[in-house]
Amino acid sequence: AQRVTQPEKLLSVFKGAPVELKCNYSYSGSPELFWYVQYSRQRLQLLLRHISRESIKGFTADLNKGETSFHLKKPFAQEEDSAMYYCALSGSGANSKLTFGKGITLSVRP
Amino acid sequence: KAGVTQTPRYLIKTRGQQVTLSCSPISGHRSVSWYQQTPGQGLQFLFEYFSETQRNKGNFPGRFSGRQFSNSRSEMNVSTLELGDSALYLCASATGGEYNEQFFGPGTRLTVL
């Protein structure tokens, strides 16, 4: 079974502070991991995905297969980073559906 | 490219009624997935259609059904509505290949009274 766990519901930091949003997953196979973001009054959109190994808006995420984690990190948070963040997992073939975590609200204070 | 569109954006129904939601994917996308978003359960996968065939299905009762047309547009139907069906229903389209990015629509907010 596919499962994604985001253990925290809310993270509040000051501008310029480092951010780490945690994500753990359960999947028997080789999953693809994603982070989606939803800014206020906007639709859900892809932030980054493991397979592309990109840094988007200063965010990075490393897949740790040993710890089955895909934490999202940013060294210096900005106010515009305030949003809802969802970690998601996709399997391959018949398991290609996206399974989402419950999401975490990131609030960056000035 | 135009994004994913969903109609209607808002719906109010009463218990026992049925409802049909519509989703138009990005041009060229052959996969359409549906999700239910609620404050308590978060984002839950309903089903995915690819080339007019249901390819994946989540753990929802049979009251939830869908279909996809030859132009990749998709509809989702919920029969015998219950209060607990009140939610934001999101549609996402993708090319349909493996591990492909899904593009989300704005959602349809369904309220069941």
Image (tube, coloured by chain):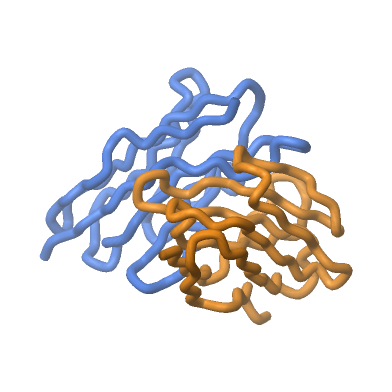
Quadrant in the rendering for residue A80: bottom left
Quadrant in the rendering for residue A84: bottom left
Foreground of the two, B42 or A41: B42
- Residue at x-position 65% and y-position 28%: A30
Chain with colour blue in the figure: A
Locate residue B88, reporting x and y percent.
47, 62
User: In this rendering, would A80 be left or right of A41?
Assistant: left
- Residue at x-position 62% and y-position 48%: B46
Foreground of the two, B50 or A29: B50
- Residue at x-position 41% and y-position 65%: B113
Q: Colour of chain B?
A: orange
Locate residue A100, reporting x and y percent.
49, 43
In this view, which residue lies farthest toward the front? B16
Give the answer, above or below, for where A39 lies relative to A75: below
Foreground of the two, A20 or B91: B91
In this view, which residue lies farthest toward the top? A66
Quadrant in the rendering for residue A58: bottom left
Q: Quadrant of the image for the N terminus of chain A?
A: top right
* Numbered label tally: 0
- Residue at x-position 41% and y-position 53%: B38
Give the answer, above or below, for where B9 lies relative to A52: below
Locate residue B42, reporting x and y percent.
42, 48
Give the answer, above or below, for where A29 lies relative to B38: above
Q: Quadrant of the image for the C terminus of chain A?
A: bottom left
Locate residue B34, reporting x and y percent.
62, 56
User: In this rendering, would A110 be left or right of B112?
Assistant: left
